[in-house]
Image (spheres, helix red, strand yellow):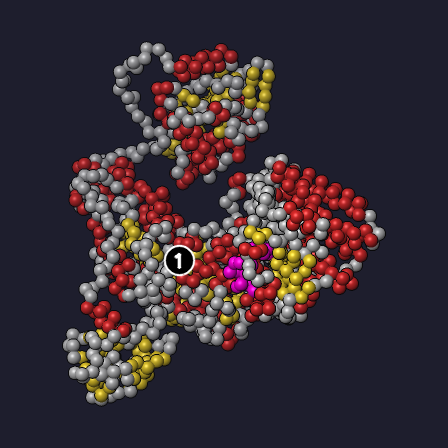
Amino acid sequence: MATLTYLQAISDALRTEMRRDERVMCMGEDIGVFGGAFKVTDGLIDEFGKWRVMDTPLAESGIVGTAVGASVVGLRPVCEMQFSDFVSCGFDQLVNVAGKTHYRMGLAVPITVRLPSGGGFSGGPFHSQNPEAWFMHAPGLKVVAPSTAEDAKGLLISAIRDPNPVLYLEHKHLYRRVKGDVPEGDHTTPFTARVARSGEDLVVIAYGAMVHTALAAADELPDASIEVLDVRSLVPLDEEAILASVRKCSKVVIVDEANATCAAGAHIAALIAERAFEDLDGPVVRVATPDVPIPFSPPLEQAVLPSVESVREAIRELLEY
Amino acid sequence: MSSSSTDTALVDVTMPQMGVSVSEGTIAEWHKKVGEEVGYEETLVSISTDKIDTDLPSPAAGVVREIVVEVGETVEVGTVLARIAAAGAAPTNDEVGGASEAAAAVGDTPAPSTPEPAPVAEAPKQRGYSPVVTRIAAEHGIDLTKVEGTGRGGRVTKKDVLALVENGGAPAAEPPLHIESPYKPDPTPTAPASSPTLSRMRRLIGEHMKRSLETAATCTTWAECDMAAVEAARAQLRVTALPFVARATIDALREFPQLNAWLEGEKYTVHESVHLGIAVSLGEDGLIVPVIHDAQDLSVEGLAKRIRELARAARDRTLRPDDAAGATFTITNPGQYGSIMATPVINQPQVAILDLEAIVKRPVVVTDATGADAVAIRPMTILGLSWDHRALDGALAAQFLSAVARRLQSVG
Amino acid sequence: MATTQAQAAEGAQFLTPEDRVELLRYMLLMRGIEERAMNLYRQGKVPGSFYDGFGQEAVSVGAAFAMAAEDRLCILHRDLGAHLVRGVTPARIFGQYMGRAGGVTGGRDGNVHFGDWRLGCVGMVSMLPDMMLVATGMAMAFRIRREKRAALTWFGDGSTSRGDFHEAMNWAGVQRLPVIFVLENNQYAYSTPLSSQFAVDPVERAAAYGFPGVTVDGNDVEAMFEATRVARERAVAGGGPTLIEAVTMRMHGHAAHDDMKYVPKEQLEEWRRKDPIDRQVARVAELGVDVDALRAEVREAIDSGTEEALAMPMPDPSTATAGVFAEEANELEDGHAPWSGWRR
């Protein structure tokens, strides 16, 4: 065990897999000599060389498309979108090429696409997005989002070893703020949910940075027994874990940092309505970012993103219901 | 990177956020000592972060009043590093433009309103009960109108009703045995229908049934069946027992195809595909038998879906002619109304019809793995098969019926 | 780096008489299969739409013939001949058109949207220039492993207008990758003529990306072979990519439902005289080969393939939702194959 930041855990996962498997390579903008916009790949080029830690042209469709090509002749590319927002430029290659190839032709496309996501830092409308729901709607793509350093490593290694295209959402807010014990060497995390805090009066369902928001909100309500479920994997979604928590607690708050409409939380709410209706003791409550671009100026941005306060108040309201 | 302290003459120098993911920084060097003068935007301190090393320009002209964080110390973004007593003539924080003005504005704005949580509807008094409360109350025979609620507006919460259950506050009633077929007492007879004659459908059914009994040599065979496995499996799939019985029947028909047949005069035709008729009650109007064509291709879930669709279409009167023609075997399911045995009439020109009755808990003798017998409470049903003695004999009917029962008992 | 005009005559020395007959056989097969499939379409046996490459047979057959077994191809919808060269049987192709369980994609995708990866091909998507990046990525893997292999993809004149054309051309040029881009200039993208598609012939753009562009008579199968052979040699020797512009004509509509009213009759008449099969028939006849016997042989292969496909069952509806995700990666033999730089 070593104590690593979330960011160091991601680097550790890349280094571990590249040492273990010569097929694994990293590709993206500014990831080689410069070490990446967030320094996730810092130093990797010295150990693995410029062809396995590749500074690519500024072309997101190119990054995803060439990764698909490299993967179907045996490599295991790990692509970095400099910011998750830029994945929109690679959307077609992900949705139409990577996602459909196995269903159509039985040919696996083992690529991983790292998406530094999330807001809260005056990144503005183009450096703050949470695009996971776009890809949950596209068949053939897996979507995972770690919240802890341990899972940041484990989920990334699992993503690299998965024979499918996996979108790996790494939240920028957690990079250097979250630290934790991380197993050294080989460490994988299954694509299932995790109970981050156990309770029985109400469950908060969240993923990524919102897990920490939910935990902080729960800590502010010491009189209630609040469970926090860290979904970890959005596709595949651990439906049984979600339903088990709902059946136990009967009251549910779902938190998304993403825009509310058709977000992951909306899908989870639908799942609960379909399969746990008779276990509910109140309306399913959602806290999410309203359907606006993420604004730049701090008071505007803070006004739209879910916060500890807004989650706490949603919990309190529902507890009293 | 700076903001006014409460004392407007003192300007705070804070640890800046050098990049969105940076959470802390370390002091590398102070370029001014306490008491020294510093100009506006003159380098005051050098810092080091995970991403970059940089010099911080002073946010105001004046005298360094206090250094709060020493060289080598690592502090979080936003921590005050030093305080500067602003010189009267020098641009102060409120006067300089750009970033610091914006930052100051943050401090002056009333705390950004946290987004309103998704509104939870205010529950009006006695508006109703949540699904989980209703379910627990039903399971334990609790009269909810007598429960004092502690929720908003006196709403009865799950906690309230669970507390009552734990305190034994209400007699625990037997939970309904078979959600699909709860026994209902006969309704009080309503006023006689205004029409003194039978409806056309009633008349047609009557003629059809009479003709069947006149044509076929109808016999009925019964077998008992333990439905515990089906009950467990259907709860998981959230369907009724009927599709399981349909699937078991289809499999048994594949084993005994002589029953998947038509007898028209002397012409006896065995069918390869199973086109399964399902009798659907239309209430007072009578009964119709929509058909699941090629039922052998459908799973239990597929059958359940098809049965639901056909029953709905039958009740909505939107069945197409094809939907009610061509059945090779029929299942009737009056058990949903609580009866336990019947002698169904064969749907001509088919040679047999299966009858599913209510599933009822009964004490039965069960034998465990060691051969020891014991009395256990099991959900049992009686399967009835009416068959045409012209087409087959009792031995085959019995074999077929036990094949259906055997398959139902080993579901899952 | 300048744009050049490739010549068929130079290629002849690399082709044996048997090869020249094979080139004709594949073109006859392609045309015969597409004519039969069109009839099946009119008989209501082919669901959806139907696309063919009538008149463009030389482009796919000639280019595919120059590629080695270890090379990898992204084949588009007017390039059926390339699938035949790689070894896809007529029966599997008919099964594919008819959505049968025995078609190449087992009914998951239709018409020419397929690629048998076991034969070194990746199936196209409808956003055609996407495949240029996939081919570039395959070439990148070959470069990383220092293998003597190349990737090739076809695309049309319309594709040159989309961004992925630029991203792929630029990427391949920057990394000097062993990839061959075959621009199938068939005069129309659906109904849009070249004059509405680009201001400068896209073959000229190759120089701007740092590699050669070559214009070839796309109706001469031996010229197509030769241009591709030269490009492949350059590629595996580390010389980087080549853009080959095959000038040809789409003799049928964009799809079966398109009556091509927008094409002047004289233009079609002119191109009919340049039919690629007629040209190769003349060459092969000169070698003393019995072309009628060859035609009969091809006809027989098509008849038996049709029969075999018609006997294939339709896919089982209960499998419609299976296989979205892979349970395990494919055994590709890339990376550990005889040609691989990583072979231990």
User: Was residue C165 drawn as part of the magenta stretch in this picture?
Assistant: yes
User: Was residue B149 drawn as part of the magenta stretch in this picture?
Assistant: no
Residue B347 visible? The answer is: yes
Q: Nearer the viewer, residue B362 or C90?
A: C90
Which structural element holds mark 1?
loop
Q: Nearer the viewer, residue A85 or C38?
A: C38
Secondary structure mostly seen in magenta is helix
Q: Nearer the viewer, residue A166 or A262?
A: A262
Circle 1 packing at 10 Å, graded few (<14), some (14-19), many (20+), is: many
Image: C18 above or below B380 = below
Q: Is residue C166 left or right of residue C295?
A: left
Image: A45 above or below C286 = below
Residue B86, image x and y in percent? Answer: 19, 82
Q: Residue at x 62, y 56 (%)?
A: C185
Residue with the most extreme right position: C288
Q: Quadrant of residue A51?
A: bottom right
**What quarter of the picture does the N terminus of chain B occupy?**
bottom left
Q: Is residue B173 left or right of residue A234?
A: left
Q: Residue at x 43, y 62 (%)?
A: A86
Residue B205, image x and y in percent? Answer: 43, 16
Residue A221, image x and y in percent? Answer: 22, 58
Residue C330 visible? The answer is: no
Q: Write down the chain letter for disc 1.
A: A
Residue type, mark 1 in image:
Pro
Q: Residue at x 28, y 59 (%)?
A: A304
Image: A265 above or below A175 = above
Q: Which residues are magenta?
A: C155-169
Q: Which residue is mark 1?
A: A131
